[in-house]
Image (cartoon, rainbow, N blue to C red):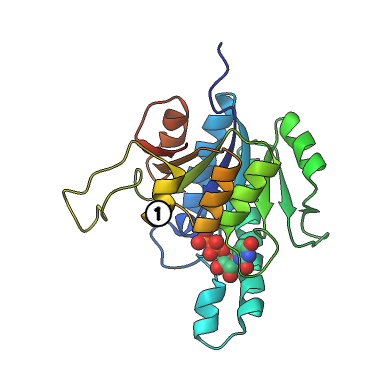
Amino acid sequence: MTSPRFKRILLKLSGEVLMGQGQFGIDPGTCERVAREVMAAREAGHEICLVVGGGNIFRGVAGAAQGIDRTTGDYMGMLATVMNALAMQSTLERLGVHTRVQSAVQMDKVCEPFIQRRAMRHIEKGRVVIFAAGTGNPFFTTDSGAALRAAEMKCDALFKGTSVDGVYDADPKKVPEARRYETLSYDRVLADNLKVMDAAAVALCRDNNIPIAVFNIREPGNLAAVLRGEGTSTLVQN
Ligand code: UDP
């Protein structure tokens, strides 16, 4: 069997993916569906690092708009990502997938602290490593956390799971004739302010030559299909 182009990937999911049809919080059925996607990718021989956002529970910017100090709100957002990480850990382990959660904010009763060399060892042993609490710093996002961990973990690509099947030249939910890009350069994404990930995350991927695949995680079997080079996605690379 030839080695896949993207053997080790970092899968970034926004917290909203875990809400399912709800408006808020964690939907266990949706967690299981996402976990099965991760399991299928692992069974196909991929090494998986996972980063889940926290927007389904709390965002610092939204809190600041309502009077919560921004830094405090951002720490609340980071704690939200830990809850999501634990939900995914529990779901994956119920399906028989070995995992570890490593947090950028230390909380030793709950999970391991982020230690790059230890995370590498987990990956080598076939575990899915879930990185929680983003970068550990306020004024950042989990997109930046994902790009950072992808670089540290020497991932071959960053897979950004969304509710659309790639990057379009207009919002496909509003403009029926919107066209999907097959590939894009990092610089084009930044210059045109295309909604892939936030600019800091895109720049970090560009500087470390990590391709970004944007795909629809809501479509069953799609992660494994895109990893096989099938399915629809947009690839951002040099
Ligand atoms: N956050 C932060 N630093 C980080 C990562 C996250 O302060 O490195 C906070 C920030 O308030 C953010 C929230 O955690 O709004 C949830 O993360 P994000 O908005 O990236 O989640 P997503 O949109 O992916 O669900």
Residue in the picture at 43% in, 31% down = 226
Q: Is residue 26 visible?
A: no
Q: Report whether 211 appears left or right of 107.
A: left
Q: Count numbered badges in the picture.
A: 1
Residue with the mark numbered 1: 191
Task: Say which of 55 and 187 sits in front.
Answer: 187
Most extreme residue toward the top is: 1
Residue in the picture at 70% in, 35% down = 127
Task: Say which of 217 and 109 sits in front.
Answer: 217
112 versus 206 height, above or below: below
Mark 1, secondary structure of its residue: helix
9 versus 51 height, above or below: above
223 versus 205 height, above or below: above
Residue 236 found in image quarter:
top left
The picture places residue 3, in percent across and down from the top left corner, at 58, 17
Amino acid at pointer 1 = Ala
Q: Is residue 103 visible?
A: yes
Mark 1 crowd level (few <14, some 14–19, many ≥20, 10 Å Cα)? few
Q: Report whether 133 appears left or right of 212.
A: right
Where is the N terminus found, in terms of image quarters? top right
The picture places residue 51, in percent across and down from the top left corner, at 60, 50
**The image quadrant in which ligand 1 is located:** bottom right
Residue in the picture at 19% in, 55% down = 175
228 versus 17 height, above or below: above
